[in-house]
Amino acid sequence: VQLVESGGGSVQAGGSLTLSCVASGFILGDHTIGWFRQAPGKEQEKSSCINCGDGTSYYADSVKGRFTISKDNAKNTVYLQMNSLKPDDTGVYYCTASTVRALARLTTGGYEYWGQGTQVTVSS
């Protein structure tokens, strides 16, 4: 199983980026997929998940209204559209996948597969 993220980069505050995560050896389908981020000096945070909880999407308060998670089953790819980026959004973003369907929205455990991460840097 391999998850490969792309789309990270450096942007100014207020800018946008779209992260992509292509899966191989694993059909994303209805499994729960999450995006986590690790900021320097901060605890790892789950930013978003799709097919979680009641089958809808989840967003952390810190990104709600600015980030949108989506997936393309035909391409076996998950996306994270990030708008109105802030310096606090800086960090390494990881795509994760669970073998569980409808993993609880708030849980940070249960994601067996992780990508290598992609760096997002937002300057003020």
Image: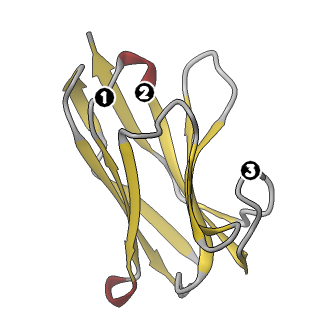
Quarter of the image that includes the N terminus: bottom right
> Mark 1 is on which residue type?
Leu
Quarter of the image that includes the C terminus: top left
> Mark 3 is on which residue type?
Leu
Q: Is residue 87 above or below residue 65?
A: above
Disc 2 crowd rating (10 Å Cα; few below 14, some 14-19, many 20+) is many
* Picture residue at 78% right of the left edge, 52% below the top: 107
Q: Mark 1 and mark 2 in contact (Cβ < 8 Å)?
A: yes
Name of the residue lying farthest toward the top: 124
Distance between the alpha carbons at the discs numbered 2 and 1: 6 Å
Q: Nearer the viewer, residue 20 or 80?
A: 80
Distance between the alpha carbons at the discs numbered 3 and 2: 19 Å
Q: Position of residue 52 (x, y in %)?
A: 65, 67
Q: Nearer the viewer, residue 34 or 121?
A: 34
Task: First in sequence, mark 3 or 1: give its number.
Answer: 1
Badge 3 element:
loop
Q: Is residue 26 above or below residue 84?
A: below
Q: Quadrant of residue 17?
A: top left
Badge 2 element:
helix
Callout in the foreground (3, 2): 3
Q: Position of residue 106 (x, y in %)?
A: 74, 50
Residue under numbered circle 1: 85
Disc 1 crowd rating (10 Å Cα; few below 14, some 14-19, many 20+) is many
Question: Which label was assigned to residue 89?
Answer: 2
